[in-house]
Image (spheres, rainbow, N blue to C red):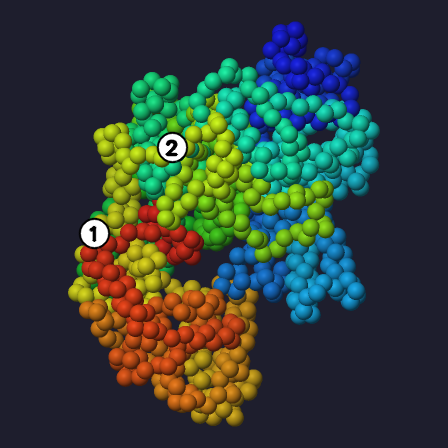
């Protein structure tokens, strides 16, 4: 039954009432943050059902962007208006289009991760050339998937893109239309564009042949279907006589065209949105939707909701000042929100700290003080928002110190130790030669193997060029070790099961036998892993066997996938899969929350920790925006390898900086989540500076903003008990992190260092421990294998150049490479073929560079061992020769990424080699040459006494840290390429347990 309209009118403001009571024709509702837009949509549904004669519930369609938002509208409508609202359709755009397409085809849906995996498996068929990164074949695919989505968002078909490229070709053939660029640049750009057009078309054909429909294409395919099926379109227009759209600012051109078609001649289309909260530019959304609406429906009615029911006027004033810097790239630049709150309230605080640790400790202490003093009612009134999950680690430690319960939204379960343990067991069962996974398994206390024995195993495996599994196997026989026998028997038994049975049939048995089933805190995470495996088995697998799963999961991780818990224990579907933003972070569906809870007294609730994207649509009494630093918020701009050319974008484009403006809108969203108090945290030091957004606010001298330098410490900080530290031993499960955190006494005597070892330690001491102290054996990566092959081939080629240059030809170079080639170790035939082509090109480059010079070859791959400042150094110089004018030159060949002149000038390796050349070989190199084989560029450099002194100090300091057993993990961008991630404590979330998710 429809609710009492008089009662409803009494609590609605005038603009809300106008929006609800508008019936016929297009309606554009510009609804600022906290102005009650969802309520307006729900009330409008009830009003239409009551006041439009013969209107049935199934004649109303409400569309939004997440299942949770659609479910919220549905439940509110049913609760308020009873059975008449049950027939109304509340849906996401993608669910609506998928259901439409499903009725007319049998295509299976692909989320963005599975689309990446599909394309990775068909790399050779994509016929990549320019965009193929041979060391990481899948590196290009994130950008390709994103590019294809942008094409579909803008209704650009492969045929449209090919036509665009052909027009470029025609323009280049017309001299009057050419830009003033060198001819080679124009030709290279055309070749790249042709490749993009070919790959886009080929990827679409491959997916169509397999009966697959990717997430990005869902809307555009629905539009195409409606355009080609007039009868179907008329049926839908007759059924959905009134259409309502929430979060209209997030619509892209394809979604807008879908709405236009569905609205038809009736044009009963009501859209609600806020251009200042358009934060999904990477999904193709744009504030331009409002402009498009005005153009498409010139007779529309526009209503502005500007009465905010959430925040104080001071908070709104600061938020308004922040978003105003987007200047005219806003639909309504003069929009100003007014609060329904009484005057007064706290000023917005900017807290400036000396470093990130102080920021975290003060934040935790402040929350504790405000709750314990009664200033705030509960911990659950607080939300700490950050731009990316990696910024919350120091805060988690600080909250534990204070004994504050907290919940983390959208934390991946595959960062939790028990999940990582189980994944290690799966890999060890399926791939016994996987030394990293077996290392984690060996460290499980159930097998009774200790750290010193583990290190012995690793050294023997490394020395004897065997796998860790083979060494343990030998030890179990030779030493009659029952513990090693038990481990091998366990792995062997499950290996036989895994060869014959689908994973879904035996994975829970593995969990139970390993004891991963009884702990309530771990159960939800482990259940999520089980459900992930079951879903893969049922929907994505041909055999269901472990080998197939490990191949799939390897690609899944490479693509940036993560296993998370859906809210309210709902099974997460492809429709909630989050794409990547410009910072490389997975963006969750803004209304889908996953809670990870610290076990503590929950009587006062839990502090909510989440990304700003995750906070969209939520509100909290007290909001703290954390880590507002340059480079962190706004994030640094990342330019994708391929972008949709501007002429192909539909609708108006912003005139300013796309990236910064979207980040500023995201900042605005963060500020407008707060009801009563808002605190902005930053760091100001020699190395870190406050966010540009804060500096903008400082510059406009907003009277409602107060800057405070925070003290070094507080009584709460000093008195807070240390709760659980990340390095504290776990009760059970792998002890690999515990072993890694323990002081190391494994360095026998003085360490012998190499240039690469020093660079490894300086990058990450723990990586050095794993690779040089424990010496966990790793198979050579394809890039390392190629480097080894090419160094051997270059050595032979240079020797021939200096002894019998007349015998060298292109054919002999090919034969030379064949002699050194080793096919084992490459990922697939495509990678091997591309590396071989690359090898021929690089050898021909060496031939061209050296063939015109007279060289006296002095040494090739010359090994050395010497003492420098009390430290033993070892290495091997690629080449030393005497050139023109009797100059002695030292050459180092680089097969990987081309180095820069600055890198050559600062190369630790070249400095050590120059010192060895002088002290060990008695030669004074007049020049050091870093030869980039990829570009045939020889970078010349020298070393001064000051250069040697600086490196000597660095070696002494590093050796001292090693002797002291200091091998901490040092996380950074380099972790992306590190083989040791599965056993690195910096990539685990310790002390976090899961309980029933809360909304």
Q: Position of residue 720 (x, y in %)?
A: 25, 31
Q: Is 359 placed left or right of 702 in the picture?
A: left
Q: Quick one: 348 or 2, which is closer to the camera? A: 348
Q: Where is residue 211 in the image (x, y as percent from the top left)?
A: 66, 48
Q: Residue at x 27, y 34 (%)?
A: 713
* 400 relative to 651, above or below: above
What label does residue 708 carry, if any? 2
Q: Quadrant of residue 33?
A: top right
Task: Find numbered disc 2 in the image and state the secondary structure of the residue it sits on.
Answer: strand
Q: Can residue 600 be seen in this view?
A: yes
Q: Residue at x 40, y 69 (%)?
A: 905
Q: Quadrant of the N terminus?
A: top right
Q: Is 203 placed left or right of 310 in the picture?
A: right
* 223 relative to 678, above or below: below
Task: Find numbered disc 1 in the image and state the secondary structure of the residue it sits on.
Answer: loop
Q: Residue at x 70, y 47 (%)?
A: 649
**Residue at the disc numbered 1:** 743
Q: Where is residue 303 in the image (x, y as percent from the top left)?
A: 69, 23
């Amino acid at each position: 039954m429809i609710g009492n309209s008089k009662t409803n009118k009494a609590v609605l403001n005038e603009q809300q009432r106008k929006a609800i009571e508008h019936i016929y024709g297009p309606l554009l509702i510009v609804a600022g943050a906290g102005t009650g837009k969802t309520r307006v949509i729900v009330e409008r549904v009830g009003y239409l059902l009551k006041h439009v004669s013969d209107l049935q519930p199934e004649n109303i369609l409400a569309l939004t962007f997440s299942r949770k938002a659609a479910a919220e509208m549905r439940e509110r409508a049913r609760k308020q208006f009873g059975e008449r609202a049950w027939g109304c359709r509340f849906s996401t755009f993608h669910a609506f289009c998928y259901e439409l397409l499903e009725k007319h085809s049998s295509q299976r849906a692909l989320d963005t991760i599975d689309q990446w995996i599909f394309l990775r498996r068909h790399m050779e068929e994509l016929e990549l050339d320019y965009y193929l990164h041979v060391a990481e074949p899948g590196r290009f695919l994130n950008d390709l998937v994103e590019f294809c989505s942008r094409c579909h968002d803008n209704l650009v078909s492969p045929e449209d893109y090919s036509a665009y490229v052909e027009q470029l070709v025609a323009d280049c053939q017309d001299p009057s239309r050419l830009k003033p660029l060198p001819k080679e640049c124009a030709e290279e750009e055309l070749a790249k564009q042709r490749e993009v057009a070919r790959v886009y078309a080929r990827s679409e054909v491959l997916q169509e042949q397999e009966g697959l429909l990717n997430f990005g294409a869902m809307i555009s395919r629905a539009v195409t279907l409606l355009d080609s099926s007039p009868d179907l379109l008329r049926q839908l227009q007759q059924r959905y006589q009134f259409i309502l759209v929430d979060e209209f600012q997030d619509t892209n051109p394809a979604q807008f065209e879908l709405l236009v078609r569905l609205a038809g001649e009736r044009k009963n289309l009501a859209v609600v949105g806020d251009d200042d909260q358009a934060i999904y530019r990477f999904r193709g959304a744009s504030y331009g939707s409002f402009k498009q609406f005005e153009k498409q429906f010139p007779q529309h009615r526009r209503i502005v909701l500007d009465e905010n029911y959430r925040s104080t006027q001071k908070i709104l004033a600061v938020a308004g000042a922040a978003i105003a810097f987007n200047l005219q790239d806003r639909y309504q630049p003069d929009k100003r929100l007014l609060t329904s709150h009484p005057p007064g309230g706290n000023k917005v605080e900017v807290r400036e700290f000396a470093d990130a640790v102080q920021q975290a400790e003060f934040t935790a202490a402040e929350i504790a003080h405000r709750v314990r003093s009664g200033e705030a009612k509960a911990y659950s009134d607080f939300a700490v928002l950050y731009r990316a999950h990696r910024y919350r680690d120091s805060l988690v430690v600080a909250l534990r110190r204070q004994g504050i319960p907290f919940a983390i939204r959208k934390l991946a379960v595959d960062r939790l130790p028990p999940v990582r343990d189980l994944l290690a067991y799966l890999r060890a069962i399926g791939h016994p030669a996987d030394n990293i996974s077996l290392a984690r398994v060996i460290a499980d206390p159930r097998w009774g193997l200790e750290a010193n024995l583990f290190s012995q195993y690793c050294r023997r495996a490394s020395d004897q060029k065997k796998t860790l599994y083979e060494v343990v196997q030998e030890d179990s026989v030779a030493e009659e070790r029952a513990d090693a026998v038990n481990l091998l028997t366990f792995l062997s038994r499950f290996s036989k099961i895994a060869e014959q049975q689908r994973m879904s049939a035996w994975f829970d048995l593995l969990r139970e036998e390993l004891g991963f089933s009884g702990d309530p805190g771990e159960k939800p995470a482990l259940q999520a892993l089980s459900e992930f495996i079951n879903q893969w088995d049922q929907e994505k697998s041909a055999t269901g066997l472990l080998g197939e799963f490990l191949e799939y999961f390897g690609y899944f991780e490479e693509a940036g996938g993560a296993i998370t818990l859906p809210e309210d224990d709902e099974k997460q579907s492809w429709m909630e899969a989050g794409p990547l933003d410009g910072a490389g972070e997975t963006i969750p569906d803004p209304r889908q929350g996953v809670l990870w809870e610290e076990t503590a007294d929950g009587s006062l609730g839990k502090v909510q920790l989440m990304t700003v994207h995750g906070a969209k649509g939520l509100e909290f009494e007290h909001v703290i925006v954390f880590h507002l630093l340059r480079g962190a918020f706004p994030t640094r701009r990342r330019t994708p390898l391929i972008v949709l050319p501007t002429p192909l974008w539909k609708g108006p484009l912003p005139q300013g900086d796309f990236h910064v403006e979207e980040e500023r809108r995201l900042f605005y969203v963060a500020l407008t989540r707060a009801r009563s108090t808002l605190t902005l945290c930053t760091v100001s030091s020699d190395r870190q500076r406050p966010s540009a957004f804060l500096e903008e606010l400082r510059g406009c001298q907003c009277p409602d903003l107060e800057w405070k330098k925070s003290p070094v410490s507080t009584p709460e900080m000093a008195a807070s008990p240390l709760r659980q530290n990340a390095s504290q031993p776990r009760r059970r499960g792998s002890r690999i992190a515990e072993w890694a955190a323990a002081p190391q006494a494994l360095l026998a005597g003085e360490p012998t260092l190499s240039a690469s070892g020093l660079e490894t330690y300086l990058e990450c001491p723990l990586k050095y421990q794993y690779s040089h102290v424990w010496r966990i054996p790793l198979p050579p990566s394809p890039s390392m294998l190629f480097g080894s092959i090419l160094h051997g081939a270059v050595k032979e080629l240079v020797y021939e150049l200096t002894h019998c240059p007349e015998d060298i030809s292109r054919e002999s170079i090919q034969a030379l490479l064949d002699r050194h080639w080793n096919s084992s170790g490459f990922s697939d035939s495509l990678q091997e073929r591309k590396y071989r082509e690359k090898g021929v090109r690089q050898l021909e480059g060496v031939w061209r560079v050296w063939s015109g010079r007279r060289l006296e070859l002095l040494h090739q791959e010359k090994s050395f061992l010497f003492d420098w400042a009390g430290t033993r150094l070892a290495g091997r110089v690629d080449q030393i020769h005497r050139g023109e004018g009797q100059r002695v030159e030292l050459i180092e060949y680089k097969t990987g990424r081309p180095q820069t002149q600055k890198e050559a000038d600062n190369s630790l390796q070249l400095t050590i080699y120059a010192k060895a050349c002088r002290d060990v070989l008695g030669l004074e190199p007049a020049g050091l040459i870093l030869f980039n084989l990829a570009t045939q560029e020889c970078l010349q450099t020298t070393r001064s006494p000051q250069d040697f002194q600086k490196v000597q100090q660095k070696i002494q300091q590093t050796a001292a840290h090693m002797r002291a057993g200091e091998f901490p993990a040092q996380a950074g961008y380099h972790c992306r390429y590190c083989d040791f991630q599965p056993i690195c404590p910096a990539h685990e979330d310790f002390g976090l347990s899961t309980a029933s998710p809360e909304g």
